[in-house]
Image (tube, rainbow, N blue to C red):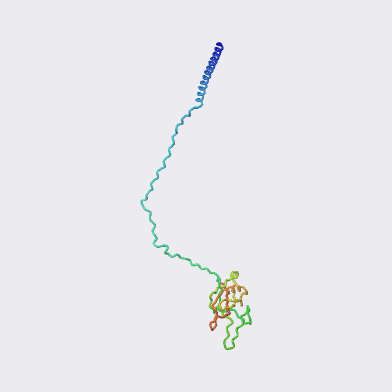
C-alpha cells in the first residue's frame, strides 16, 4: 500500500518537473522570436529623410503708376454758335411730277349730235314732248346734269388698260332723276370708241344724288337728264 502511494507520488512529481521544463524551453524560444521580429521590423521600416524647405521666389511688385502730367496751358474751348441752327430755314427742293389726269372731264353741254326719234335708242335721243295745244311752250325732252343741284357726284374711274394704251373717248349717258333725287334707268346714248368707257360711266351715274326738280307749283317731278363724260389724258 505504501509502495503504491510512493510510486504514484513519484509519477506526479516527474510529470510536474517535465511540464515545467517544457514551459521554460517554450518561453525561451518565444523571447528569441520576438527579438528577431523586432529587429527585422526596424530594419524594413525606416524614417523618411526630412526635405529641406525651398524658399519661394517672391513676386515682383508691380511698378507704381506715374502721376498724369498736367498741361500748363488749358485747351481752347469750342466757340458757341452765334445763331441758333434750328432757326435757320433749310432749303427744300421743289418736286415737280407730271402725272396723267385720272379724272375725266365732264362737259357742260352735249357735244354729240342728238337724233330725234320716236323711241329710246342708244344712238339717238328721246322724242320731244308735244305742246299742250293751249299756247304753252313744250317742255324740253331732257336737261343737262349741270342744271340740277348735285348732292353726291363721284367721277368715273379711268380704266387702267385704256390708260396704259392712252385711249381717249367720250360717253353720252341719259338717266331719270326721280322725285327723291335718285338716278334711275341710266343708258348710254352714244360713245366713242364704242363700248370702251360705257361701264365706268354708267357705274358712276348710278351713285349720283340730286335735289329733285320742281315744277312751277313747287312740286317735285321726274326729269330726264343727260351727261357727257370726256375721257382724256394729259399730254
Q: Is residue 192 left or right of residue 25?
A: right
Q: Vertical placement of 143 versus 90: above or below?
A: below
Q: Vertical placement of 148 versus 96: above or below?
A: below
**Where in the figure is residue 232, as x and y percent of width and height?**
57, 73
Q: Check the picture and name the quadrant holding the C terminus.
A: bottom right
Q: How many marks?
A: 0
Q: Vertical placement of 53 versus 70: above or below?
A: above
**Where in the figure is residue 160, as x and y percent of width and height?**
59, 69
In front of the other: 29 or 232: 29
Residue extending farthest to the bottom is: 134
Q: Check the picture and name the quadrant holding the N terminus.
A: top right
**Where in the figure is residue 196, as x and y percent of width and height?**
61, 73
In front of the other: 21 or 33: 21
In front of the other: 49 or 228: 49
**Where in the figure is residue 146, as x and y percent of width and height?**
54, 78
Q: Quadrant of residue 115?
A: bottom right
Residue extending farthest to the left is: 72
Residue extending farthest to the front is: 1
In front of the other: 192 or 54: 54
Amino acid at each position: 500500500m505504501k509502495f503504491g502511494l510512493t510510486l504514484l507520488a513519484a509519477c506526479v512529481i516527474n510529470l510536474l518537473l517535465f511540464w515545467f521544463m517544457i514551459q521554460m524551453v517554450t518561453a525561451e524560444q518565444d523571447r528569441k522570436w520576438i527579438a528577431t521580429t523586432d529587429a527585422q521590423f526596424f530594419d524594413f521600416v525606416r524614417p523618411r529623410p526630412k526635405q529641406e524647405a525651398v524658399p519661394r521666389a517672391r513676386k515682383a511688385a508691380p511698378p507704381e503708376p506715374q502721376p498724369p502730367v498736367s498741361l500748363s496751358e488749358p485747351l481752347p474751348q469750342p466757340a458757341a454758335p452765334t445763331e441758333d441752327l434750328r432757326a435757320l430755314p433749310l432749303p427744300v427742293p421743289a418736286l415737280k411730277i407730271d402725272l396723267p389726269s385720272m379724272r375725266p372731264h365732264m362737259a357742260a353741254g352735249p357735244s354729240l349730235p342728238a337724233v330725234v326719234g320716236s323711241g329710246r335708242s342708244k344712238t339717238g335721243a328721246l322724242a320731244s314732248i308735244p305742246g299742250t295745244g293751249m299756247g304753252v311752250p313744250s317742255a324740253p325732252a331732257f336737261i343737262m346734269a349741270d342744271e340740277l343741284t348735285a348732292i353726291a357726284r363721284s367721277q368715273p374711274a379711268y380704266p387702267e388698260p385704256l390708260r396704259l394704251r392712252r385711249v381717249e373717248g367720250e360717253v353720252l349717258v341719259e338717266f331719270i332723276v326721280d322725285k327723291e333725287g335718285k338716278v334711275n334707268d341710266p343708258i348710254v346714248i352714244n360713245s366713242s370708241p364704242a363700248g370702251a368707257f360705257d361701264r365706268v360711266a354708267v357705274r358712276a351715274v348710278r351713285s349720283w344724288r340730286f335735289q329733285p326738280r320742281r315744277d312751277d307749283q313747287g312740286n317735285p317731278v321726274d326729269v330726264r337728264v343727260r351727261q357727257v363724260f370726256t375721257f382724256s389724258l394729259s399730254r
